[in-house]
Image (tube, helix red, strand yellow):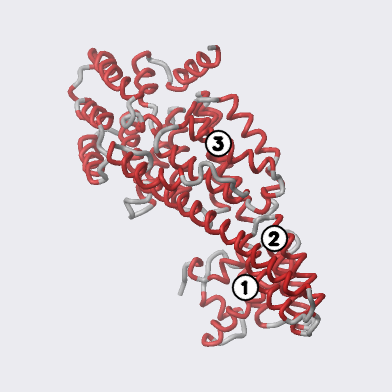
């Protein structure tokens, strides 16, 4: 009987471990077992040698009965986590703080209140310096208990100071929690809808979110509060198509980390997301030079960030590879962009278990667009198909699901796979209507594709010119322009009209902008 590894936490943990973690675990297990092999160690070796979880193989290789296996896996899981914690404690400030708290608890239990208090003060200083406010509250509450056991004059003063500090920290926690929630809600809205698509969408976003954000405009915020505040403003303006404001707040988001460099380790995920939004804003504004500067700066931090942990390495790859691909989209160097695909595929395989469907879909779409720009239409269709079949939930990045189908129609036509184009058009049209994502640009495109078989070759360029002139005004329309963020339709039409590759059209426009 074969079971998906995702349903076996201990197997997934073993497969995620680095060589250093595995070596450390074996040393730890040897000390535990007194140099004798134990069953849980044998189970670890079996898991380590397997590519996929297979219970029948485990029972053959391990001297354990089937009914004993669940307890054995639970024991192994606990020992693995304990071993990894011992290795990671020096790299994680929050783990170091909690270690001091544990030591303080031991000393408190032994009646050594002064030593316990000293360790708690040390832990509190570390937590405050790194704005780990939730932990600070725990420490203060513990300090009150320790101080209550000491009958001296300073006890009352300590308790009063701790209470005031606790109230101040709680205020910061409430603000950070509210701002974090706003940011999460805006991000969730983006994942579901993409950009605003109508006046109704704008009213929804403005009426609900603007008053919440205005509340913090003139407040003096802590580092953590500021990060979540800028994060919320970036997502707010991103959804609203205001990419200049998006860039403005993304700069502030990243700058605050540059001013507090040590926080890049503590809150690496928020730092990388800030870099991602900054790069994305520069891409949408067409600022190639500044985009390259930010990406090169991020490259210099690669080793430091990726060495933090596996999750940091995964997130760095998302930001870095999106940025690399966007550089080629801006400059029209698709032939160089497709050379990245092998490296990206290796990254996707390595982090397959951790990447969300959203991240995978965006990678597939960008790679498909890269192949389309390089006129490798079959490869383009292969990656578009991954998006179309990657999820049964139409609400997950439904914007990408819609545009993947539209691009698939165009790529099928370019690849000469248009024998069932009418059926494909009907299918795409029905999907767009179902997703409520049928706008004027899509209507014009589908109308044109429907008429393809009836257009004489002598009239083809003229019809393309008509479509180009119809679509061009939509590129600056507040709602219709969203299509052009996903599909560079005008560049494709221009390439067909002039009889030159789409990469040349984009390159010409890129050089023209950089000469200006």
**Residue 303 versus residue 227: which sits nearer the camera?**
227
Query: Is the residue under label 3 in contact with that under label 1 (CB below 8 Å)?
Result: no
**Of residues 26 and 160, the one drawn nearer to the viewer in this rendering:** 160
Q: Point out the tag, 2 or 1, that comes first from the N-terminus.
A: 1
Residue 46, disc: 1
Q: Position of residue 308 (x, y in %)?
A: 68, 54
Q: Secondary structure at mark 1?
A: helix
Residue 375: mark = none
Q: Identify the secondary structure beneath mark 3.
A: helix
Please indicate whether residue 304 sits to the left or right of residue 373 in the image: right
Vertical side of 187 occupied by 510: above or below: above
SS type, badge 2: helix
Residue 25 seen anywhere in this rendered image of the structure: no
Label 3 crowding class (10 Å Cα cut-off): few <14, some 14-19, many 20+? many
Which residue is drawn at the image coordinates 32% and 51% (left, top)?
A: 394
Give the residue pinned by disc 3. Answer: 278
Residue matched to label 2: 127
Q: Nearer the viewer, mark 2 or mark 3?
A: 2
Task: Please tell me which of labels 1 and 3 falls first in the chain.
Answer: 1
Instruction: Check disc 2: other Cα within 10 Å, few if <14, some if 14-19, many if 20+.
Output: many
Query: CA gap, disc 2 to disc 3?
Result: 29 Å
As drawn, 397 above or below 105: above
């Amino acid at each position: 009987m074969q079971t998906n590894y995702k349903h076996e936490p201990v197997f997934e943990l073993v497969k995620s471990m680095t060589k250093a973690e595995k070596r450390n675990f074996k040393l730890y297990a040897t000390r535990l077992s007194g140099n004798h092999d134990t069953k849980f160690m044998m189970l670890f070796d079996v898991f380590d040698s397997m590519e996929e979880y297979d219970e029948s193989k485990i029972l053959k290789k391990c001297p354990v009965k089937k009914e004993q296996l669940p307890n054995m896996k639970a024991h192994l899981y606990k020992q693995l986590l304990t071993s990894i914690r011992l290795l990671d404690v020096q790299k994680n400030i929050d783990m170091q703080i909690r270690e001091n708290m544990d030591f303080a608890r031991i000393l408190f239990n032994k009646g050594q209140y002064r030593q316990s208090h000293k360790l708690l003060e040390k832990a509190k200083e570390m937590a405050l310096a790194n704005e780990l406010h939730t932990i600070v509250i725990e420490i203060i509450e513990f300090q009150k208990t320790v101080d209550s056991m000491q009958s001296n004059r300073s006890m009352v003063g300590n308790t009063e100071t701790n209470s005031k500090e606790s109230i101040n920290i709680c205020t910061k926690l409430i603000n950070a929690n509210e701002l974090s929630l706003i940011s999460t809600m805006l991000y969730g809205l983006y994942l579901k809808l993409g950009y605003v698509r109508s006046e109704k969408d704008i009213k929804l976003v403005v009426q609900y979110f603007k008053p919440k954000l205005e509340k913090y405009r003139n407040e003096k915020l802590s580092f953590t509060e500021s990060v979540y505040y800028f994060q919320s403003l970036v997502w707010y303006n991103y959804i609203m198509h205001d990419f200049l404001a998006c860039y403005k707040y993304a700069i502030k988001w990243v700058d605050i980390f540059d001013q507090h460099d040590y926080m890049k380790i503590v809150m690496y995920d928020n730092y990388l997301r800030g870099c991602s939004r900054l790069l994305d804003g520069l891409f949408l504004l067409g600022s190639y030079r500044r985009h390259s500067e930010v990406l090169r700066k991020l490259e210099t931090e690669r080793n430091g960030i990726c060495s933090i942990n596996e999750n940091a390495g995964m997130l760095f790859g998302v930001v870095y590879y999106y940025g690399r691909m966007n550089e080629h989209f801006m400059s029209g160097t698709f032939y160089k962009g497709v050379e990245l695909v092998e490296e990206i595929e290796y990254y996707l395989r390595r982090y397959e278990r951790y990447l969300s469907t959203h991240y995978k879909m965006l990678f597939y779409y960008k790679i498909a667009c890269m192949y389309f720009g390089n006129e490798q239409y079959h490869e383009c269709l292969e990656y578009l198909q991954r998006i179309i079949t990657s999820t049964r939930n139409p609400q997950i990045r439904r914007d990408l699901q819609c545009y993947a189908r539209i691009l698939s129609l165009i790529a099928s036509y370019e690849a000469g796979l248009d024998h069932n184009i009418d059926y494909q058009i009907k299918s795409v049209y029905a999907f767009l209507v179902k997703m409520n994502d049928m706008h004027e640009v899509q209507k014009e495109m589908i109308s044109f594709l429907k008429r393809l078989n009836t257009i004489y070759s002598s009239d083809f360029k003229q019809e393309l010119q008509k479509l180009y002139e119809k679509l061009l005004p939509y590129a600056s329309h507040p709602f219709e322009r969203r299509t052009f963020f996903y599909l560079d339709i005008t560049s494709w039409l221009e390439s067909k009209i002039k009889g030159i590759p789409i990469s040349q059209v984009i390159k010409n426009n890129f050089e023209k902008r950089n000469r200006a």
